[in-house]
Image: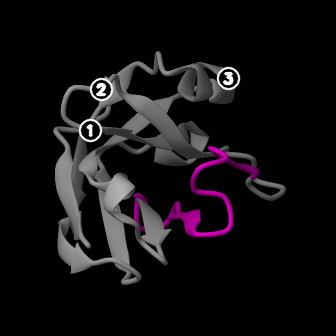
Amino acid sequence: QVQLVESGGGLVQAGGSLRLSCAASGRTFSTYSMGWFRQAPGKEREFVAAISWSWSGAMTYYADSVKGRFTISRDNAENTVWLQMNSLKPEDTAVYYCAADRLLNTVVKGTPDYWGQGTQVTVSS
């Protein structure tokens, strides 16, 4: 069982930055691929970024809409994954969810085993 708790959301002006954190419980965090998703009002939840668990060097994947602006990273010793969001736009406004699964492909497809409760990000114009 993995429990995920997100934090770091808030209100920011367009062009600003936020750093989201996802704290995971469990001793096997390092073997889970992690991801971030978001859901804007009236829209379906969408993939944002994912990071694999490989000991040889984690691989990262991004949605085209955030590539070059967002960075996903993890620290297995701290059981934490982050999403650094720069150059924020009003269209980035959404509830952001952390996700975990043993399979990276499952995370990217949006069907991971575990989800956090979400944190609100609001970008004002």
**Quarter residue 22 falls in:** bottom left
Residue occupying image coordinates x 40% and y 36%: 99
Alpha carbon separation for disc pair 3 and 1: 23 Å
Q: Position of residue 28 (x, y in %)?
A: 47, 40
Residue occupying image coordinates x 57% and y 56%: 66
Q: Amino acid at mark 1?
A: Ala
Nearest to N terminus: mark 3 or mark 2:
2
Circle 2 SS class? loop
Q: Amino acid at mark 3?
A: Asn
Alpha carbon separation for disc pair 3 and 2: 23 Å
Question: Can you name the residue that lies furthest to the front here?
Answer: 125
Identify the residue under disc 3: 105
Considering the image in quadrants, where does the C terminus appear?
bottom left
Identify the residue under disc 2: 43
Circle 3 SS class? helix
Q: Check the image and report above or below for 38 versus 58.
A: above
Q: Position of residue 58 (x, y in %)?
A: 73, 54
| Region in magenta | 59-80
Identify the residue under disc 1: 40
